[in-house]
Amino acid sequence: MNVEEAIKTNKKIPLESRTIIHFFLVNNKINEMISASLKDFDVSLQQFNVLRILRGQKGEPANLSTLNERMVTKMSNTTRLVDKLILKGYVDRVVCPSNRRKVEIRITDEGRAALEKMDVNMEVVENEILKNLSSKEMEQLNELFNKF
Amino acid sequence: MNVEEAIKTNKKIPLESRTIIHFFLVNNKINEMISASLKDFDVSLQQFNVLRILRGQKGEPANLSTLNERMVTKMSNTTRLVDKLILKGYVDRVVCPSNRRKVEIRITDEGRAALEKMDVNMEVVENEILKNLSSKEMEQLNELFNKF
DNA sequence: TATTTACATTTGTATATACAATTGTTGTAC
DNA sequence: GTACAACAATTGTATATACAAATGTAAATA
């Protein structure tokens, strides 16, 4: 993923700008690859993320604000994201009995089964994305990311 | 930008997944900061990008496919993105006389003036984003990004 | 207990993005 | 020259995302 080639320029780009542009380029690539691998299941990356959070609850339900806190990309409409997962039968949602302002969202058995299949695809695509990086280099990346 | 804290988990995340999640988290942060700094000018990051490409043309017009080639984030509707820049008076578009299938898109003086103001904001926000990284670390990041 | 404040989610609306189909133009083969 | 393929951009439609306002509930205060 070379910057100058990707944006078809032969100008010298300052290191700061170049770093940020490079970031976006790699991000787009990762996004495309992951989205493609989830396409079979007709879920977006965000929806997949929510399913994983719900599975991580180990039977405990989550409410919307919990989901928002834990989502990798906080988006401004988790209600409608959950609506879509309900339509697919992957989650259900009931009003919280102890506090009727809240909702209780749970992953269904169907959602869990689908998620297990997605996991397989995800592992494949993650390895594909990172195939040129050693463990040491990944550690290095994580260290650098901590500085942001 | 710590992963576990950002997504409020205390689970151990495998290095591969962690790297990719970390990537998204930092990318979201960069996106937010840049979008916020462009908000004063009522342009999106993509629109800003197009303006910069047009300025880089040095008077030569660009057509849509050229823009698409050079955009950092290739989006599937550059026509409508350009529509919006025209509405703002920042660019103009005419049918290419030598090949009526193509269009010629140019930045206007008004667009150029606005872009110069944006540049100032951009430099500030880029420095803010990268304030904890040395030049050497940025180089390192760019090297690692080349492996994607 | 009535009123106000804070909370949690949902809804409305505008904008952004993705993808496919369409339109109009040019080039090519016969 | 006509038919067909390739090209470049636009349009239609569906979905995604952002932001603000509205709804309904619970807690706090007087």
Image (tube, coloured by chain):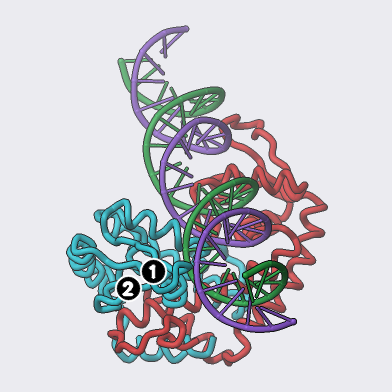
Chain colours: A cyan, B red, C green, D purple
Residue closer to the observer: B98 or C20? C20
Question: Residue D16: horizontal and vertical position, in percent?
Answer: 45, 55
Residue at 66% x, 31% y is B97
> Foreground residue, C13 or B32?
C13
Query: Quick one: quadrant of the C terminus of chain B?
Result: bottom left
Query: The numbered mark 1 sits on a residue in which chain?
Result: A
Q: Secondary structure at mark 2?
A: loop
Whether callout 2 and callout 1 share a subunit is answered yes
Whichever of callouts 2 and 1 sits on the residue coming sooner in the sequence is 2
Type of the residue with mark 1? Cys
Circle 1 is placed at which residue position? A96
The count of marks equals: 2
Q: Which label number is shown at residue B148?
A: none
Q: Is residue A14 above or below residue D21?
A: below
- Residue A131 appears at what percent x and percent y? 27, 76
Task: Write down the quadrant of residue B10 in the picture.
Answer: bottom left
Give coordinates of residue A69: x percent, y percent.
Answer: 46, 77
Select label 2 or label 1 by which is in front.
1
Badge 2: few (under 14), some or many (20 or more) residues near its Cα, within 10 Å?
some
Q: Is residue B6 left or right of residue A53?
A: right
Q: Nearer the viewer, residue B89 or B147?
A: B89
Q: State the residue position of label 2.
A: A61
A61 sits left or right of D15 in the view: left
Residues at badges 2 and 1 in contact (C-beta under 8 Å)? yes
| A146 to the left or right of B83 | left
- Chain at numbered mark 2: A
Residue B145, placed above or below residue A146: above
- For the point 72% across and 55% down, the residue is B58
Q: Is residue A33 left or right of residue B58?
A: left
Helix, strand or loop at disc 1? loop
